[in-house]
Image: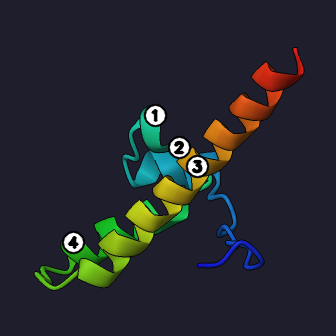
Amino acid sequence: MTQTEQYVYPPMPSEAELDEQDVPFIHRDRCAAHLINYYKCLDKGISFCTATKEEFYKCQYIALKERLANHTKQTQTH
């Protein structure tokens, strides 16, 4: 992904859906929808859920990079 491309986060699931899918509180962020998709894939008994798992980790990585970049900007301006 180049700097000109923007990652599009999926819509945030409702609190009820997060509870229903037993999403851990630590993962109730902008990537929670990807984690739910991964859980649903696993629930079907499919052992080839690699794509949904990779999408979740990609989302987590991009979100982390954004948080670090924002933190760096904030600390440099103070």
- State the residue position of label 1: 25
> Could you tell which of marks 4 and 1 lies nearer the N-terminus?
1
| Residue farthest along the right direction in this orientation | 77
Q: Position of residue 68 (x, y in %)?
A: 62, 38
Q: Amino acid at mark 2?
A: Arg
Q: Position of residue 3 (x, y in %)?
A: 71, 72
- State the residue position of label 2: 28
User: Contact, CB < 8 Å: mark 1 with mark 2?
Assistant: yes
- State the residue position of label 3: 65
Q: Amino acid at mark 1?
A: Phe
> Could you tell which of marks 2 and 4 lies nearer the N-terminus?
2
Crowdedness of circle 4 by 10 Å Cα count: few (<14), some, many (20+)? few
Q: Residue at the spot x=53%, y=64% of the render? A: 33
Q: Decide which of 58, 52 is in the foreground and name it.
A: 58
- State the residue position of label 4: 43
Mark 2: which secondary structure?
loop
Crowdedness of circle 2 by 10 Å Cα count: few (<14), some, many (20+)? some
| Mark linked to residue 64 | none
Q: Position of residue 47 (x, y in %)?
A: 10, 81
Q: Position of residue 32 (x, y in %)?
A: 51, 56
Q: Amino acid at mark 4?
A: Asp
Crowdedness of circle 3 by 10 Å Cα count: few (<14), some, many (20+)? few
Q: Residue at the spot x=39%, y=39% of the render? A: 24
